[in-house]
Structures are given as structure tokens and as C-alpha cells.
């Protein structure tokens, strides 16, 4: 992350994470280099997902990354999620002219997904629950 507090706000407001203050390291008192913050989804004592934010870059990636492995969030309604992200001005990637991409698995299941960016241009995926 380049800005821990900006990223924290994004992950809490847009994706519904909460901060676990037990694991916060505020380097230099202003969330400088090597600061860390742990976020979680679900109840604190039985979180379903934990995410660490680590201050390790000075500014967002530019140009945007072209490849990579990305965390995926599964939703029940991909269209509603896309509408919500657009209303919150989240950066949505368009791939070959498409926003929502469809793939069919080897077993014949069709899934739908789209890529979006956090404040540092890290790529993440929203996938429709099959």
C-alpha cells in the first residue's frame, strides 16, 4: 500500500472489512513505511477472511499491472455489485471491451466475474456465486 489510511477506508467502506486494532503498527506515528494494519470480514472471533495492509510503496502502481494472481470476492448479485462499485467510483477494468466476463469450466459451469482496483491499483475480482 502507498497510503494505509486511504486503503483502510476503501476496504472498510467498499468491501465491508473491519480493522483489528490488536495488529496495527503505526510506524513513525503517521503510518509511514513498514506500517501494518490487519482487517477482517465476519465476527472478530471467527473471521471468514483476514487481509493485511502493509505500507511498502510510495505511490500507486503506474502503469497498471498487466498480469498477476488476484484475490476474488464471491457475491450473489454481480450486477448489483457492479452498480454499487460504479456509484462509489471504484476503478473497474474493461477486458477486450467487456466488463463482466463469462467463462465455462471443464465441468460445464458458467461463471461471471469482473476486475476492479483498490486505491493502489492492485487488481481484485468480483465473481458471481454459481
Image: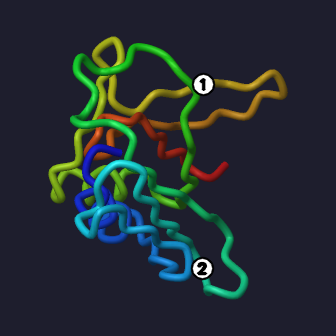
Which of the two discs, 2 and 1, labels the residue nearer the N terminus?
2
Q: Residue 83's spot in the image, x, y percent? A: 25, 54
Report the residue at 53% width, 57% height from top. 52
Quarter of the image where one finds residue 58: top left
Report the residue at 30% width, 29% height from top. 93
Q: Name the residue under label 2.
A: 42
Quarter of the image where one finds residue 11: bottom left
Q: Name the residue under label 1.
A: 103
Q: Farthest residue in the right direction?
A: 107
Report the residue at 37% width, 19% height from top. 65
User: Vertical placement of 101 versus 124: above or below?
Assistant: above
Left or right placement of residue 46 versus residue 126 in this view? right
Left or right placement of residue 115 versus residue 108 in this view? left
Could you tell me if the residues under marks 2 and 1 are in contact, i.e. CB atoms within 8 Å?
A: no
- Circle 1 crowding by C-alpha within 10 Å: few under 14, some 14–19, many from 20: few
Q: Residue 50's spot in the image, x, y percent? A: 61, 64
Report the residue at 24% width, 34% height from top. 60
Amino acid at each position: 500500500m502507498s497510503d494505509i489510511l486511504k486503503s483502510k477506508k476503501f476496504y472498510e467502506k467498499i468491501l465491508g472489512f473491519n480493522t483489528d486494532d490488536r495488529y496495527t503498527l503505526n510506524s513513525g506515528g503517521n503510518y509511514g513505511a513498514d506500517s501494518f494494519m490487519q482487517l477482517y470480514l465476519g465476527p472478530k472471533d471467527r473471521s471468514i477472511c483476514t487481509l493485511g495492509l502493509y505500507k511498502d510503496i510510495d505511490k500507486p502502481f503506474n502503469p497498471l499491472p498487466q498480469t498477476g494472481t488476484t484475490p476474488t470476492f464471491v457475491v450473489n448479485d454481480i450486477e448489483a455489485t457492479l452498480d454499487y462499485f460504479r456509484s462509489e467510483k471504484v476503478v473497474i477494468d474493461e477486458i477486450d471491451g467487456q466488463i463482466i466476463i463469462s467463462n465455462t469450466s471443464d465441468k460445464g459451469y458458467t461463471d461471471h466475474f469482473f476486475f476492479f482496483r483498490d486505491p493502489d491499483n492492485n487488481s481484485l475480482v468480483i465473481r458471481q456465486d454459481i
